Image (spheres, helix red, strand yellow):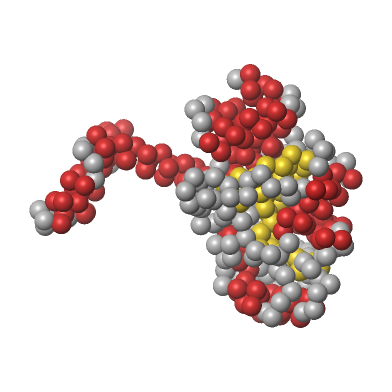
Amino acid sequence: MSALVDELLAGKHSALARVITKIENRSPGYREIISDLHRHTGHADVVGVTGSPGAGKSTLVDKVAAEYRDRGLTVGVIAIDPSSPFSGGAVLGDRIRMASNAGDMDVFFRSMSARGSLGGLSTATTDAVTALDAFGKDVIIVETVGAGQNEVDIVRTADTVAVLVPPGSGDDVQMLKAGILEIADVFVVNKADLDGADRTVQQLREMLQGRGGTAGHHGGMGLERPGGDGDAGDDGDAWDPVIVETVANRGEGVDAFIEALAEHSDYLDRTGQREAQERERFAAEIRTLLREDANRLLSRELVQRGGIEQYVDAVVARETDPYTVVDDVLAPLRDCLDADHPR
């Protein structure tokens, strides 16, 4: 185990910051660090906060972190920012978002670049959550970019997902129907003091009732049971998403939001869903890493063969075809696998 890992496990915030920097930059040795930290994880509640731009995600996360601190809990916040198309870095990486928690070392805030991920989450986010969990943070909040219905990647990282919906004409709720509905365990109608908030809450209720009262990525999609906010069903295996109203800039509704998160956390433990989703999460992570490593190996193989352009030239000249090229490039890998596991 490296000295850096020892320092992180000993509670040194400087070591935590350095580890996350290594993770984000994919610096040499970061994989070994994650491997060492993995055995020390599994204790934090991970909350995902997503929703359309302008919904007030950062303000709510700031107030929620402050409330958790008042309750004696330590907090880690990973805020995913839009990535620069030129550098790949976070466009707003240095902005001050945690005004209520400035100077509090038990609220560790880190802004990370989305690095072009369609789901709004960097592939390094899961590793950063691992570092915060191993460090001992009680609650880890992941705030996504807020790019609309592509924000679904958060379900691969968070135990509980909150989707913010600002009051409006109903367009935002219509957008939710297109996909993000399925990932919400808690809906938050933020800026509830604005005109249209009641209508937005009503639209959400009608939308959930139209789906048989159930939704959410942890809630047994498709189960037919009566609706009702915020509890498991009579059969004990379905979760009805909670709808919470907040005015985050004044701290109103923050307590109710945290209670909704706690109820969902209890539900995960009571029904065994937490273990089930953890298995799904690790399976997805393994598949992702396999794809990344396989792509890297195949790219190296292409380079060693002189690059892809020669194959493109041959395909354009109709001397071969894409399927034959792929069979040719993959042949060494296929032969190795067949040798280890003959059919």
In the rendered image, which quarter is residue 4 located in? Answer: top right
Q: Is residue 186 visible?
A: no
Q: Is residue 245 visible?
A: yes
Residue 265 on image: x %, y %: 76, 52
Location of the N terminus (image quadrant): top right
At a point 80% along the width and 35% down the height, the residue shown is 105
At a point 80% along the width and 74% down the height, the residue shown is 194
At a point 78% along the width and 76% down the height, the residue shown is 197
Q: Please determine whether, in this image, residue 245 is positioned above or below residue 17.
A: below
Residue 198 on image: x %, y %: 80, 78
In the rendered image, which quarter is residue 256 located in? Answer: bottom right
Position of 194 with respect to 88 (left or right) is right
Residue 204 on image: x %, y %: 71, 75
Q: Nearer the viewer, residue 198 or 92?
A: 92
Residue 163 on image: x %, y %: 69, 63
Location of the C terminus (image quadrant): top left
Position of 326 with respect to 119 (left or right) is left
Q: Please determine whether, in this image, residue 290 is positioned above or below residue 255.
A: above
In the rendered image, which quarter is residue 332 located in? Answer: top left
Q: How many marks?
A: 0
At a point 72% along the width and 70% down the height, the residue shown is 166
Q: Nearer the viewer, residue 163 or 55?
A: 55
Q: Nearer the viewer, residue 336 or 96?
A: 96
